[in-house]
Amino acid sequence: MKLISARQAWHDALHENRSSVMAVAAEQARLGKKSGGGDEKVIVMLENENGKEVAKSYTVRREGVQETRGGSRLTESRCAHMLVAGLIMQAIDTLPKSIRHLGHFLYSPLANGNDLSIAHALAWLGSGLDSLPERKRERAYWMAMAALQSHKRLVHDREGMGPGEVCMFIEDRTGVRMDPHNWMRDWAFIWNRLADHIDRLDAKALKPVAAVVADMKEREDEYAA
């Protein structure tokens, strides 16, 4: 895995099967930096065990041996990729569950409706907007979901949602018309407050992953020196 940013690392780590990645990471950690000597070497393979992929290590002779195991032989590059992915996943797992779901919604290729639902609740409940008048509060509640979708576009280098699109998004869910011409007067403050809150949540989600990425980049620089 090429480490560019915490956002990219979160996404790429979850391209792999979670159990496989964690199994290889655990096996590699157990083996450490030991390498075989003489006529032997250690290989790591993925094997199916009761319907679940697990990593197993085997000591084999370097020459004159035909491998017949049905497991999936891991190359050094794939092993390294899965090890880094496992470290990223471990960092993600240190997060509170709700923040973890928000991060999955924003960055995971496997994001689902549950991730969006929990991220929406987190964005709304922490915004401090529940004291708004009822009519405005209902629209602000759905505005929180629009702000999440807009933020997701922005962090993936796409254009965020403008006032007109936000108004249509909310109209579709409430059946009540919102006039984008009144955006600055009625809704800009709410939108900006939600956007700032989601920015802070995003930074919190990325913090442990960014620490792993920074550590791995530092090691790469040391090896290259």
Image (spheres, rainbow, N blue to C red):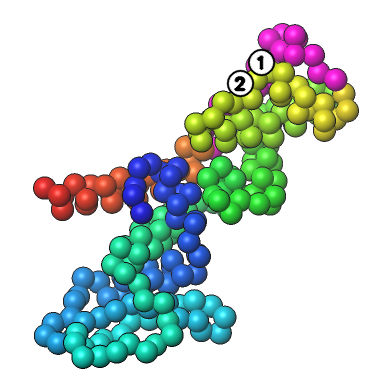
Relative depth, front residue between 184 and 179: 179
Establish if 64 lies above or below 205: below
**Residue 103 percent location from the top left of the image:** 54, 45
Relative depth, front residue between 60 and 52: 60
- Our reading of the magenta stretch's main secondary structure is helix
Which numbered marker is on residue 188?
A: 1
Quadrant into which the N terminus falls? bottom left
- In-image side of 13 versus 127 (left or right): left
Element type at marker 1?
helix
Q: Amino acid type of disc 1?
A: Ala
- How many residues crowd mark 1 within 10 Å: few (<14), some (14–19), many (20+)? few
Element type at marker 2?
helix
Per the image, the residue denoted by label 2 is 192
Q: Amino acid type of disc 2?
A: Asn
Q: Do the residues labelled 1 and 2 touch (CB within 8 Å)?
A: yes
Magenta range is: 177-201
**Residue 76 percent location from the top left of the image:** 28, 67
**Residue 59 percent location from the top left of the image:** 26, 86
- In-image side of 224 versus 86 (left or right): left
Q: Which residue is drawn at 49% across and 76% down?
A: 53
Q: Residue at x 79, y 14 (%)?
A: 179
- How many residues crowd mark 2 within 10 Å: few (<14), some (14–19), many (20+)? few
